[in-house]
Amino acid sequence: MQVAQKIQVDIISDVVCPWCFIGYRQLEKALEIAGLEGDIRWHPFELNPAMAPEGEDTAEHIARKYGATPEQSASTRSHMKSIAEPLGIDFSGRSKRIWNTFDAHQLLLWAQDTGRQTALKLKLFEAYFTAGENVSDREVLLNAAEAAGLNRAEAADVLADGRNAETVRALEQRWGEMGITGVPAMILAENGLIMGAQEPERLAIALRKMAALDPA
């Protein structure tokens, strides 16, 4: 039986970014089309690093940050839903508030070497977009970690002592210095940069190209 070639995909994203959720599901399909196996690694990016602990109403936030009218926001949500549903993504319970995600990124960094990082990322996406939960709340974060197969007590320690805080900030600064100002951003085989969610067929072409250039 032939073993699929593995390609490293570094994904820079935030857990309250709907296009990041969509982009990951598109990547899954693209890898299948390309006949490749993905070595997925998630990296921190905060869309709103200065977000207050109490969060902000989503509609008000979008209007303030992007200048979008209610009609424009409704059109964007409708378009997003039409792309998300065929990918098995349920946005119906999306939180009505935008939350600070710094603690979520600390947990994700901790999970990187456990083999459960993607499972945790997906649980956080689901918590925010499907269950409408506050992803800055410690209990919500610990529930997501436990649901992803991670040790709840260890996760609590990570959040309590802030051991990953400095590294998360350094990584976020690194992406900014690289010119990454929006997400999702995917780095293929440590070389090719893909910005934004992409159609699976188009992404599969880029994956094949980068895999062919990867000496591994």
Image (cartoon, helix red, strand yellow):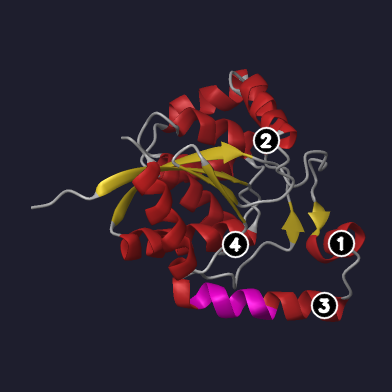
**Residue 184 visible here:** yes
Considering the numbered disc 1 on the image, is that residue within a helix, a strand or a loop? helix
In the picture, the disc for residue 175 is: 2
Check disc 2 and give the amino acid type: Trp
Q: Determine if residue 39 is in view.
A: no
Of pointers 3 and 4, the one earlier in the residue sequence: 3
Q: Which of 194 and 81 lies nearest the eye of the viewer?
A: 194
Q: Of marks 4 and 2, which one's residue comes earlier in the chain?
A: 4
- Kindly identify the residue that appears in the image at 45 percent across and 27 percent down: 153
Residue 102 appears at what percent x and percent y? 68, 36
Question: Which residue is rendered at x = 22% and y = 50% of the image?
Answer: 4
The residue carrying mark 1 is: 66
Give the residue pinned by disc 4: 129
Number of other residues with Cα within 10 Å of mark 2, as a class: few under 14, some 14 to 19, many 20 or more: some
Secondary structure under badge 3? helix
Amino acid type at mark 1: Tyr
Identify the disc placed on residue 33: none
Q: In 3D space, how far apart are the residues under numbered discs 1 and 4 (Cα atoms)?
A: 20 Å
Structural distance between the alpha carbons of marks 3 and 4: 20 Å
